[in-house]
Every structure is written in C-alpha cells, then in structure tokens.
Amino acid sequence: MRLEVEGLTRAYGGQRAVDGLSFALEAGEIGCLLGPSGCGKTTALRCIAGFDRPDGGQISAAGEVLAGPGAFVPPERRRIGMVFQDYALFPHLDVFGNVSFGLRGLDRAARDARAREVLDLVGLGELAGRYPDELSGGQQQRVALARALAPRPRLVLLDEPFSSLDTEVRRRLAGDVRAALKREGATALLVTHDQQEAFAIADRIGVMRAGRLEQWDSAWRLYHSPATRFVADFVGDGAFIPGHVEGERRVATELGPVEGELTTPLASGARVDLLLRPDDIVVDAGSPLRTRILDKCFRGAQFMYTLALPSGERVLALVPSHEDHEVGGELGIRLETRHLVGFAREA
C-alpha cells in the first residue's frame, strides 16, 4: 500500500508543529521520521493515524484520501496498525488473547490460526499463555507488534517503540522488527529520535526540524550527501573545517587541497565549511600533518579520537582499538575523501 503525505500542516495555539510536510512511502517499504524532540514527527504520525485532524494538506493510502479538504476518515476505519511506546497491552489477557483481540470478525479457527501465525513471526509462539507482567520489555514490544500485524493492516505505525528498552535489547529488537515487517510485506512508518534505530529498520528516512522535512532519502545518502547543514550535523559523527573553493573540484583547507566534486555546488572563491567524517581521516605515522589528541572514546573494535589541528580546529578519526594512543599525544593524519560535502560558511 502506497502512503502519500502532501503539504501536511498541524498547529497548536498558533504554533505550527507540522509545517508543509510532504513525502511518499511505497508499498512494502519501511519509512522513518527522524528528528530531535519537538520537531513534529509524533504529531505527523498522529495525523496519519487519525488521532489528530490536520489543519491543511492531504493524507492518502492506496489512493484513498484519509484526510484532506472536505474529507476525514476516523482512525477505526483507516485499517492502520499502531505500535505504541508503552506497549498498551491488556494486562488481564494473556499473549494469545492480546494478539487475537482485534480479530473478532473472523471465526474461531481463522482467528486462532492468524494469532499463532503472527506470534511465530515475532518469535513468541512458545509464550502464548503468558501474561504481560510475566514478559520482559522486549517481549512485550514483540507482542505489541504481533497485535498490530494480526488484522493485516495496510499500514503499520510505530511511535518511538524502543525508547524504554536498554541499548542492547533495542539493537537486537530493531533488526527483528524489520525482519518481521518485511516477511509480512507490511508498509510501515516509524518515528524516533535515535538515528541508529532509523538506520537499522528503515528503507527511507526523513529528517525533520521545526515541523519541516529537511531531507527524505536513504540512510547512505543522508550520511554521505546531506542536503542541509542540519542533516549533516544530526546524522552521523563529523566536524566542519573552514576552506575556500578553488574550482569545480578543489577546496583549499588547512589540511591542504582537497579534491572531489562538492555535493552542494559553490562558486569559485566562496568560503566553505567542509564536512569531514571520521572515515575521511586516516591515521598515518609518516604524515607531516600532526594533530594533538584531545579526547578518545572506546567503542569496542575502534576508538573515536577527537584531534586538534595546528589552528585549533577539530576533526574526528576512527582507529582500530589495538592502537591505544594517550590523550595529549600526537597523531599524524592524512585525508582520504571520496566526495566533498560543504556548505557556505556561516557568519
């Protein structure tokens, strides 16, 4: 089922929480609205679900207008499955009862078969007789997903579904949720502030700020070809260093000339802030360009080093963790960029 959102607006007390939001999600795709708290992503989700009525724009599913000028389909008629942040399970029903609750239109045999099918899909077939308070947080979230999928909705919405779980459970569950949605062939939309969740689950991601969509794209393009400085700052690690454009494929910087096509074309002579990701920086003991180690963060297989250039500008570098250098020491570096991401220098 294709989801289309066109020019969606929603205001509270004169303040626009969602401001002209437009994107499309193809049938079977998993999308994500990603952004900081207060950016409008949850309000957008509530409008799509039918819990909030938009002030403008249009929402369509499989060609049917769900909300728009002169049209509003109530939430119970939208055939949308919802997975909430707090699971919202019925405490007096066991796992099987929770999942089969929304299948009352089927006969007993069909209802039981579908409930067993989706419980097996999320890996909880053996826990059907347990009650919510007998399950871990991750297991409860799987029940919530199974319940949302059971009626075969044309769209599944997930509202910050992993925010109450610890980091390791979130990492594992994100992959399992994506696999379950894909096996079911469901179209789904997730909202989260956590980019790692977005990367793990979604096919396409929209980065939001102040009610507006800054970029709707794949995770790879958000990271390597951010459309705005906000996206560049918000997605992934990185640092900006000053430079000036010397031609179509050359930027002069403190690190020397950097060559490659700028993703955002700028005129020759323009002052530019060049984005360097940690993977653009290669530690090289023989390099004449020396940096001072300001900080380091252990990440298991790697250290993330914060390095000061001679001018005081900072860059980040990922280094295999068997290379354990002391804070305050020196490292030689060189650049190894494949494309250039730069934005006109901010005053």
Image (cartoon, rainbow, N blue to C red):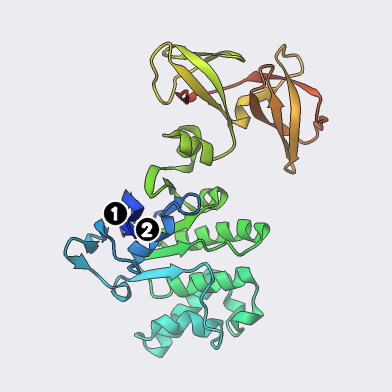
Question: Which of the 4 image quarters holds residue 136?
Answer: bottom right
Q: Position of residue 42 (x, y in %)?
A: 43, 59
When the figure is inspected, residue 237 is found, relative to residue 83, above or below; the finding is above
Within 10 Å of disc 1 (Cα), the crowding (few <14, some 14-19, many 20+) is many
Marks 2/1 in contact by CB < 8 Å: the verdict is: yes
Amino acid type indicated by mark 2: Ala
- Residue 337 point in image, percent of width and height: 56, 22
64 or 100, nearer to the observer:
64
Q: Which residue is mark 1?
A: 8
- Secondary element at image label 2: helix
Q: Residue at x 38, y 71 (%)?
A: 152
- Height in image: 319 above or below 188? above
Q: Nearer the viewer, residue 149 or 262?
A: 262
In the picture, measured across the screen, residue 262 lies left or right of residue 171, that is left
Q: Quadrant of residue 305?
A: top right
Q: State the SS at label 1.
A: strand
Residue for badge 2 = 44
Q: Residues within 10 Å of mark 2 (few under 14, many from 20)?
A: many
The image position of residue 283, as x and y in percent, is 71, 23
The kind of residue on which mark 1 rests is Leu
